[in-house]
Image: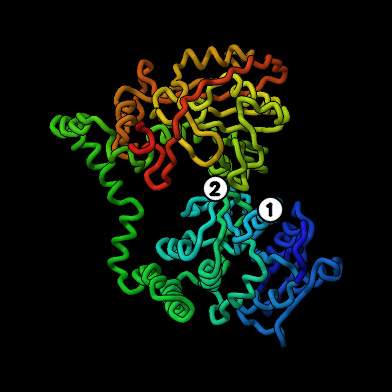
Amino acid sequence: MTSMSSNPLVSIVIIFLDAERFLDEAIGSVFAQTYGDWELLLVDDGSTDGSRSIALRYAEKHPDKVRYLEHAGRQNRGMSASRNLGIAHAKGEYIAFLDADDVWLPNKLEPQIAILQSQPDAAMVFGPTQWWYSWTGNAHDRQRDYIHDLGVQPNTLLRPPALLGRFLRVPEISPCTCSALMRRKVVDQVGGFEEHFRGLYEDQAFFAKVSLAAPVFVTSQCSARYRQHANSNCSTTQTQHSAARLAFLRWLADYVSKQYNVRWWRTLRTGFWPCRYPKLDRIYQQARCGLPGKVWRSALRSSWLSLPLVRNLRCLQFRRLQPLGHGRQWGTPIVRYYWHKYLQKHQKDIRGTALEIGSTDTIRRFGGIAVTCAEGIDLSPHSPEITVVADLSRADNVPSEQYDCFVNQFTMHLIYDAEAALYHAIRMLKPGGVLLINFSCVDYYFPRGLDMGTGEPMFVYRWFTPIEVENMLRSLDLRAEDYTLDIYGNLFSRIAYQMNMPAEELTQRELDFVDPGHPLLICVRVVKPAEWRADKPDYQTPWKPGVTPAQLNPVTGLYATEAYQA
């Protein structure tokens, strides 16, 4: 095993069985990595087609980088035993896996290595994976691609047994093996893969052991494409799924009882429900997938909610002196509903080298694989995805013309020098680059400020009007053809937002009706002109009250009573 260095060796294990059709492309995606310190172990699980010849060709052509391995007698021993064979011959400090029918994006290894080096407690890092249908080239399949939901808060370090508990409750969020990078010492510590799992659940059994042994970092970066085709292992074994899951859960119960204490098993045992009580689980799954909500939104909205008596009863909840739930955040905030609707409308603008305030979640979610480089900007490097540390209103140190897209969301009312922040946001764009930005017309106010642990406490300095925003844009030498301005909201949605009602509680008409006299959110799309030469505004320094800021409570959310009341 190599020693710790600035460029540690990564051992990449590709197992294959009759994968002649796809193997060359998988190997090619390894050679395309921006990180070059790796070795590739090609493990043949008893192939009878031409895939063995492909693997041998690479091993002969690149003997310093690629090695070919096979089981004794060229046996077929299954996926777990084949991965263990690769692990046994690995020399790297880190280990990564790639199935022969999947591919990595070029920036798979480099950012994940940076995360593990910055998170010494993390045994593994993984992120979302693109479910890849468009590899066929068919127009219909291009529309089916999507990036699967992580099911957990991204860019966080999850300590045992939190992650496994989530995997058991929602099995489909378990990571794909191609999305993970792990420390070799932890792989050895947990004993590698369980070899009696030859196909289904071999990855979940391994991830269960790792997530119970040590913390795991979950990143928002999508780094791999999971090819969807009829001959994949998951497709050909679909009918065996229930039996395989029951076998996995029985193994897990035995593993936890032997390795860990009873309290942990109480946390994890809910995963047995689907196999022990299939009918009850079917009801639960329908509820979890939104059936009650769909009934509420369709039947109730279309009929009952329109009845005068029901509408009058709903309005009684506004006769109160504090927000609903004491301000605790629940459901989808109405401004988030509007903003996501706006981003869907301009999704094609989120591409290339993209920047986002505070994280990269939004640009990765809406840009997907069109985003080739995702960067975050904030006052402090509070997570690995914050690559630009700067105050946006004083961002002179950030180079000009760097980004194809900048998503600036829900921050302008928190920046005193809004004109300077808008200037720098446009300056950092390449010519033709797009700024997607929103301005709050109404929001909660923090008299004490709010400390989110990302730098200076936040204060709400202003709420915007459409004419104010348009004057700011024109003061920066932007013409009417350089930007579009959309207004969302109405009197009811403003009141509902202030009362902390989620978007799910409003009818579609109540959400979509636009009243220019009562806007809630202003959304702007700016395309930077090729010859943009605006002067930098004079900087202004705000006065701040000498009070101890409130601390963000991640459980109650931003707007809980204890956070915004003095």
Is any atom of residue 370 visible in this view?
Answer: yes
The crowd level at tag 2 (other Cα within 10 Å; few <14, some 14-19, many 20+) is few
Task: Specify which label sits upstream in the sequence, 2 or 1.
Answer: 1
Residue 140: assigned label: 2
Mark 2 near mark 1, Cβ–Cβ under 8 Å? no
Q: Position of residue 195 (x, y in %)?
A: 58, 80
Element under disc 2: helix
In the image, what residue type sits under mark 1? Answer: Ala
Residue at 65%, 77% (x, y): give it: 84
> On the image, which quarter does residue 202 sit in?
bottom right
Residue at 85%, 67% (x, y): give it: 64
Q: Nearer the viewer, residue 145 or 127?
A: 127
Indicate the quadrant containing the C terminus: top left, top right, bottom left or bottom right: top left
Q: Position of residue 104 (x, y in %)?
A: 67, 56
Q: Residue furthest bottom?
A: 73
Q: Nearer the viewer, residue 243 or 154?
A: 154
Element under disc 1: helix
Is any atom of residue 306 visible in this view?
Answer: no
Residue 550: assigned label: none
> On the image, which quarter does residue 198 sit in?
bottom right
Rounded to the nearest angstrom, the CA distance separating label 2 from label 1 is: 37 Å
Q: Position of residue 275 (x, y in %)?
A: 36, 73
Q: Residue furthest front?
A: 546
The crowd level at tag 1 (other Cα within 10 Å; few <14, some 14-19, many 20+) is some
Image height of 174 relative to 550, above or below: below
Indicate the quadrant containing the N terminus: top left, top right, bottom left or bottom right: bottom right
Q: Which residue is mark 1?
A: 114
In the image, what residue type sits under mark 2? Answer: His
Q: Residue furthest left?
A: 309
Q: Position of residue 422 (x, y in %)?
A: 59, 22
Image height of 211 relative to 356, above or below: below
